[in-house]
Image (spheres, coloured by chain):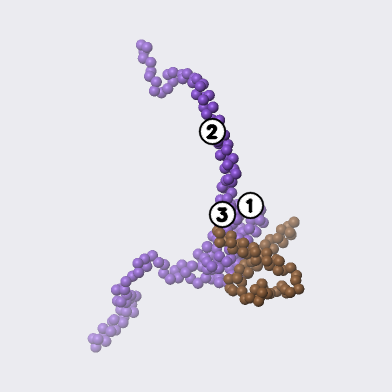
Chain colours: A brown, B purple
Amino acid sequence: MKHIKNYLSKIESIIASKALAQKPTKKSSGLLKQGAKDGQPMNMDQSDIMLIAEYVKGIRESNMEENNGNK
Amino acid sequence: MSKVFVNLTWKKTMATNRTSPVDAFRPVPPGISWTAPEKSQPWLNPPRLTSIPEIAEAYISMLASKEMANDLLDSLETGVPIASLAETFMLSGVYAGQHTIDAGILVIPVIIEMLKTIANVNKIKFVMFSSDVEEADTYHPRNIKQAVKAALAKAEEAPETMVEQLNTPIAAMPSGTGLMTRKPKAGE
């Protein structure tokens, strides 16, 4: 179970960093990926993890929207 | 003529027989009979889903289906940790030949998030990891200290009460009531 815990904490940190990155700034356009912004190409695993983080965030947001709709 | 005939028959036998005469003398690796033939199991075949989005979407649609809902809620209500459930789902996907174990491990957070959402929507209290259950079952050291203190205090009080009990006279036992007591003879 420890590996799942570590993995989940990594996903949480990615989501948190994305939320911070989404705040409007002059430099970022918001369309590029984190690796592309830094100028470093992401490897396959990293891009997969970013994708999973996106999915988790999407599920969470849809759940939040449903909860708000019910209220 | 006879040579040609022999050659033809040899070719025929080679075509019909599965093992060549060379194979009969080749040493067999020990334990080969315990191994499964190639592609005999679903997980020995190439996986059906290869990309991460495909696998994630397959799990999302599977968990959101109505057929799964009742069984899933039952298992969540019994207090099975969500991480264990997600791992089981993932391994069953590997067992069915849907995806590789590597891709499955990557997708676990999506399954966990779906399970959490389902539990929240149905207002079910869930346990995240099996270690959380173990932590809840164990006692805090402070509670253990208190229990030991209370036991020691009781032990100190005990000798006095024991002496009092020893000093009190034992009530006379009623005679002739036990099973092993002798029956009085007629003359006595």
Which residue is located at x 74 percent, y 68 percent? A23
Q: Residue B16 appears in which quarter of the rendering? A: bottom left
Q: Looking at the picture, tell me which residue is in the foreground, A2 or B174.
A: A2
Q: Which residue is mark 1?
A: B125
The quadrant holding residue A54 is bottom right
- To the question of a shared chain for discs 2 and 3, the answer is yes
Q: Are discs 1 and 3 located on one and the same chain?
A: yes
Q: x, y (%) of residue B125?
A: 63, 52
Residue farthest toward the left in the current orientation of the protein? B2
- For the N terminus of chain B, the quadrant is bottom left
Q: Chain of mark 1?
A: B
User: Where residue B143 sits: x, y (%)?
Assistant: 59, 43
First reached walking from the N terminus: tag 1 or tag 3:
1
Q: Judge whether B98 appears above or below B68 on screen.
A: below
Q: What separation in Å lies between label 2 and label 1 (alpha carbons)?
A: 42 Å
Q: Secondary structure at mark 1?
A: loop
Lower position in the chain sequence, tag 2 or tag 1: 1
The reply to whether dot 2 and dot 3 touch (C-beta < 8 Å) is no
Element class at badge 2? helix
Query: CA gap, disc 1 to disc 3?
Result: 14 Å
What label sits on residue B144 in the rendered view? Answer: none
Q: Which mark is residue B130?
A: 3
Kindly report which numbered mark, 2 or 1, lies closer to the viewer in this rendering: 2
* Disc number lying in front (1 or 3): 3
